[in-house]
Image: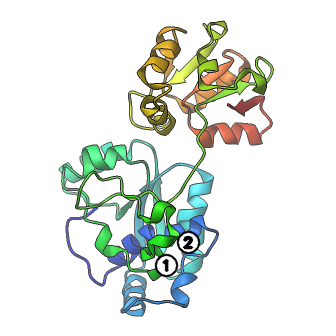
């Protein structure tokens, strides 16, 4: 996050591993596994400098899975470095407030693309990430989908990279009030029989639901017409508390809860609550 060049510091090393090591985590590899067989020039010196500083601050997503990836596995691979993870979906606002007060706390931001590109990058709060990627297995574009690194920036300097592919349901349903066979198409979510039985996360605010909402909006067979049929046609109320949205669904207050946080929903499913993804 800090606007400075960092050739051999803890921040440079950890920004590098955030963009590269996290990919290894996503593929089931320990963060440092690949570098053990194909170290780029200066890697050992970079690791030594990072160990000398001994700590890194990450602002990122609030889930057990992400804590395991960003903290537990990283510290296992690099035991000399402690990770302080500050979880939250609105940490972009926090970062801007801290910068206004002259405080530069996070080294790495791991969340969605909206806040980095709409807020942090225009404010000069991000450094270019592309030059910090050094591990050869990451630079090998043939290992990436469609042979390219997936930057979300519209143009250089590239500061934000997507390093995982996920399935994010557009909605979840209460299994006592609906069944899987009710949903064979996105348009089935707009069926008039669901009027008064649907609640949604407020997707006007960056956060959960943004990815499936963008997919629907840009899909030639769905687009703005789908949103009109869903939100206006069903008179869908909006909320933003993810646990509340899941609780309402599990309790049967609503049959469908749309564009909610998949981690919160999955936790409820794991606890045996009667909800399932569409």
Q: Residue 198 at what x, y percent from top left? A: 60, 16
Q: Quadrant of residue 202?
A: top left
Question: Which residue is drawn at the image coordinates 23% and 60% (left, top)?
Answer: 156
Question: Which residue is drawn at the image coordinates 58% and 32% (left, top)?
Answer: 170
Left or right of residue 254, residue 113 in this image: left
SS category of the residue bearing label 2: helix
Q: Quadrant of residue 177?
A: top right
Q: Which mark is residue 137?
A: 1
Q: Quadrant of residue 72?
A: bottom right
* Image depth: mark 1 or mark 2 in front: 1
Q: Residue 141 at what x, y percent from top left? A: 44, 71
Question: Which residue is drawn at the image coordinates 65% and 21% (left, top)?
Answer: 256
In terms of depth relative to the viewer, which is nearer, 184 or 8? 184
Residue marked by disc 2? 24
Give the distance between the C-alpha atoms of the residues marked 1 and 2, in whole angstroms.
9 Å
Instruction: Give the position of the N terminus as an image quadrant.
Output: bottom left
């Amino acid at each position: 996050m800090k606007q400075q060049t960092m050739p051999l510091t803890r921040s440079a090393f950890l920004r590098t591993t955030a963009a590269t090591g996290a990919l290894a985590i996503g593929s089931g590899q320990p963060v440092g596994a690949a570098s053990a067989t194909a170290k780029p020039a200066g890697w050992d010196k970079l690791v030594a400098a990072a160990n000398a500083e001994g700590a890194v601050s990450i602002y990122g997503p609030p889930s057990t899975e992400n804590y395991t990836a960003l903290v537990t596995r990283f510290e296992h691979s690099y035991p000399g470095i402690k990770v302080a993870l500050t979880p939250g979906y609105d940490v972009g606002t926090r970062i801007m407030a801290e910068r206004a007060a002259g405080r530069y706390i996070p080294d790495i931001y791991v969340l969605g693309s909206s806040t980095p590109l709409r807020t942090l990058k225009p404010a000069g709060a991000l450094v270019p990430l592309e030059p910090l990627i050094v591990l050869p297995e990451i630079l090998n574009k043939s290992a990436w989908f469609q042979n390219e690194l997936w930057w979300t920036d519209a143009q250089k300097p590239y500061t934000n990279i997507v390093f995982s592919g996920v399935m994010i349901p557009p909605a979840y349903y209460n299994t006592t009030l609906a069944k899987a066979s009710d949903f064979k198409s996105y348009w089935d979510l707009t069926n008039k029989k669901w009027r008064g039985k649907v609640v949604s996360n407020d997707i006007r605010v960056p956060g959960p639901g943004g990815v499936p909402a963008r997919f629907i909006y840009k899909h030639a067979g769905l687009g703005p017409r789908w949103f009109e049929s869903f939100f206006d046609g069903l008179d869908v109320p909006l909320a933003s508390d993810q646990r509340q949205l899941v609780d309402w669904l599990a309790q049967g207050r609503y049959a469908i809860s749309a564009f909610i946080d998949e981690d919160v929903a999955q936790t409820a499913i794991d606890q045996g609550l009667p909800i399932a993804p569409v």
